[in-house]
Image (cartoon, coloured by chain):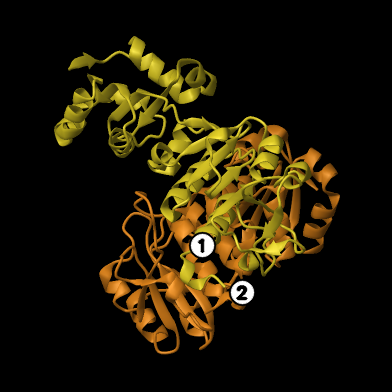
Chain colours: A orange, B yellow
Amino acid sequence: MNQITSKDNKGVKEYGKLAKSRSFREETGRFALETVKLVQEALDSGVEILRLYATPTLAQAHPELVEKAQAAGAECNLISPELEGKMTQTGNSRGCFAVCKRLDKLHHIDKIGKKGRFLFLNGLQDNGNVGTILRTAEALGADGVILSRDCCDLFALKTLRAAMGSAFRVPVYRSENPKEDLLALSRNFITCAAVVDQDACPVTQMKFGDSAVLVIGNEGNGLPEDIAGCCRVRVTIPMAGKAESLNAAMAAGILTWEMLRPPFLQP
Amino acid sequence: MNQITSKDNKGVKEYGKLAKSRSFREETGRFALETVKLVQEALDSGVEILRLYATPTLAQAHPELVEKAQAAGAECNLISPELEGKMTQTGNSRGCFAVCKRLDKLHHIDKIGKKGRFLFLNGLQDNGNVGTILRTAEALGADGVILSRDCCDLFALKTLRAAMGSAFRVPVYRSENPKEDLLALSRNFITCAAVVDQDACPVTQMKFGDSAVLVIGNEGNGLPEDIAGCCRVRVTIPMAGKAESLNAAMAAGILTWEMLRPPFLQP
């Protein structure tokens, strides 16, 4: 393995830039990963790792990880603990970093067939929320997640961390034109706009069936009316108390749960 | 109003210490609040505000807030924008800070009667999770939240922010001895240990009834066996996919939703 101690090393510099810049990630088709756990999840999910950086302690504790990365064609490098401190974005890398190739998985929305239960995230800005929703979507068995063009980046480290590996496994689609795409999806799917509105259909009375798209709006502003207007139904979570609303990830989670809820309780 | 420009002002120093130190909050019986929104929620929920700090811009934009605080007996101070930058813990104070009296609301667990639907958080360490769970508990209509002694602090700024004011309104109880308390609660309540275990009762088959306590474990380790053993039922969320689990707040949210779900779908 190569030994690297300088933060001016070309690959190390690229790592830092990939960790910080969305446009650089999009331009190069690469992204940065940090922590043993995430690198393992990436390897296990078939993500192509171009370069691995590990401290000696990490390489000793996880020889299988280094071997697996080498076998998969990654260039493996040993880094000094000082360099680890300079590379980490999270303060919790445990000495493991990787430069990966972006999955060719931001499918065009046309690739969605006529069946399945999907989430459509419109303009979500919080990486933690998007990651949490991806993790929840996988755990509950959604068929995929659609991100509108103005959502935050799937390949940002904060998104990937909150997703805990789900970002590598859940099919993710991209919508360039949400209004047009929702109108098109509405032909085959029950498209459901999630809103905070007492007059909308309570989610407990919804029959999602097996072709549904749940549309979730931005943290601060919810769904714009013109987007909600492209959906077939407006759905809401009945609430008590003075809390104005649930947070976006929690609302998405509860609605996803209802959409995918094991069938024995369906009315 | 007093004008303050120095970070060495005694009250300003106390604010900083309250924002950072749990033991200082407990010792003084006070806590620190930041952002207009949270200070407004505190005033509206009857929290006693001892001192308010506002930038001139804030005081001009929200005269009603200053008036209300003054009428409630708070000492109101104008601070310079430079001082705002030094006081803020979140980078997003919008020029509004307060030193408040802790609510006398960490009821002893004996105060819980024989009916109601409660959450019991055992050893949760992430302020954001605890705050999100409080917000969700209020929105879904839970009767209260019990925190074990080793949970993170309810009055930490990060908890209060994630709770969005719910921390001031939801009844919160404190359990000094979780095992003993759960055994005692089990006499009148269905105590349900939330676990990740295929052999536990799927939450969709649970009949919570109107006297239930849902027990949620720590983010990393879940519920210790000896705590789960003090509960009457072990309950789990059926999951698909490779995701190992939901995050603690999301799991708590979905289980709370099932416990409190509007009745028309109960089997």
In this rendering, the count of numbered labels is 2
Residue B40 at x, y percent in the picture: 28, 36
Q: Which amino acid lies under the numbered mark 1 shown in the image of this protein?
A: Gly
Alpha carbon separation for disc pair 2 and 1: 15 Å
Q: Residue at x 50, y 16 (%)?
A: B27
Residue B179 at x, y percent in the picture: 71, 37
Label 1 chain ID: A
Residue situated in front as seen by the camera: B255 or A230? B255
Q: Earlier in the sequence, mark 2 or mark 1?
A: 1
Residue situated in front as seen by the camera: B150 or B220? B150
Q: Are marks 2 and 1 on the same chain?
A: yes
Q: Which amino acid lies under the numbered mark 2 shown in the image of this protein?
A: Pro
Question: Which residue has dot 2 on it?
Answer: A262
Q: Residue at x 27, y 23 (%)?
A: B53
| Residue A142 to residue A243: above or below | below
| Residue B94 to residue B140: above or below | above
Local SS, label 2: loop
Question: Which residue has dot 1 on it?
Answer: A253
Categorize mark 1 by other alpha carbons within 10 Å: few (<14), some (14-19), many (20+): many
Q: Is residue B103 left or right of residue A19?
A: left
Q: Is residue B167 left or right of residue B82?
A: right
Q: Quadrant of the N terminus of chain B?
A: top left
- Does the rendering let one see residue A51? no
Q: Residue at x 44, y 25 (%)?
A: B19
Residue situated in front as seen by the camera: B61 or B84? B61
Residue B38 at x, y percent in the picture: 34, 37
Local SS, label 1: helix
Q: Which quarter of the figure has residue A50?
A: bottom right
